Image (tube, rainbow, N blue to C red):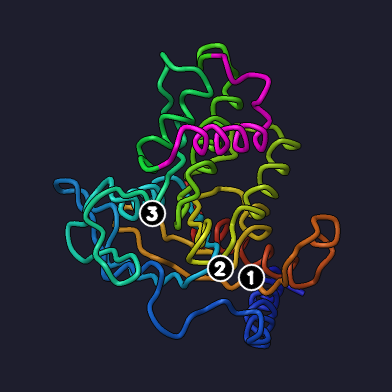
Amino acid sequence: MSESVATETLTADYHASVTALPRSLARHSPKTPALDVLGVTRQYGAYTALQDVNLQIWPGEFITIIGHSGCGKSTLLNLVAGLDRPSSGSVQLYGRTIQGPGPDRAMVFQNYSLLPWMSVRQNVEEALKAALPGQTAAQRAGATDQALRLVGLWPHQAKRPSALSGGQRQRVAIARAFAVQPQVLLLDEPFGALDAITKSHLQDELLELWTGEAEGGIANVLMVTHDIDEAIYLSDRIVVMSNGPRAHIHEVLDVPLPRPRERAALVQDPAYLRLKAHMLHLLGTVLATPH
């Protein structure tokens, strides 16, 4: 069998498997999307980073965005966070246009964004003070304790960021977001600097904290990643971006794998293998960039 025929076969196999996915696995609400990206274009002077991006994210969904460097993944995340504004189009959260940052969304950046003069514990507490000013000191202390234990930084809570490794600093940033418990959690390659074991642990903790409910926890997660395996393990759907400039959504892929997911079993699952092969084809051939 030629390579082109083999590729066409695995792509067809993936789409056939998704078409046959039982509707019971879908988490979609038939009414208002949790997040609605409507015809969004973002220009910076003469440079167009995103062009006519449309995406609906339904209540309870875990969505990852993947694509090559420069495809506008972080730009889209910043628009949802309210840290940037579209040049045209709009981004809506439960039907309301996002005008700026809010406590209903929390973002973990690639560059940690910690306050260097504060301890690990103080960094987490400061995020809680800003996002949840109505909390009592006891509530804030309890949320901080829980978050620091989840990310394995309890023994390091008195240290300042300068005394931590890069991976530990990223865990502080993740702890801040976990502690706030926003409706929508935005993650910009949050696990890239971590070792494999810590990465796996925090991925599983993230899935535990993601409740899928609009009340009482993290209802939706929107995450940027370069890791195909991570995207498949975590996601309900995967948004594949075209190359920039003028990047747009190339394809949105359903992940036809029931939850909870077991890592060891997943890598032998035919649906997983079909989806991974399809994504490798998209990123390695269809959207391949010249070296």
- The span picked out in magenta is 135-159
Write down the quadrant of residue 163 in the picture. Answer: top right
Residue beneath the point at 49% across and 35% down:
140
Distance CA(mark 1)–CA(mark 2): 5 Å
Q: Which of 154 and 204 is in front in this view?
A: 154
The residue tagged 3 is 104
Q: Position of residue 53 (x, y in %)?
A: 32, 66
What residue is drawn where x is 75% and y is 66%? 273
The three-letter amino acid code for the residue at tag 2 is Arg
- 204 w.r.t. 129: above or below: below
Give the x, y percent position of residue 288: 51, 55
Around disc 2, counting alpha carbons within 10 Å, would you say few (fewer than 14), some (14 to 19), or many (20 or more)? Answer: some
Residue picked out by circle 2: 237
Structural crowding at the residue carrying mark 1, measured as other residues with C-alpha within 10 Å and reported as few (<14), some (14–19) or many (≥20): many
According to the image, label 1 marks what residue? 255
Is the residue under label 2 in contact with that under label 1 (CB below 8 Å)? yes
Q: In the image, what residue type sits under mark 3?
A: Asp
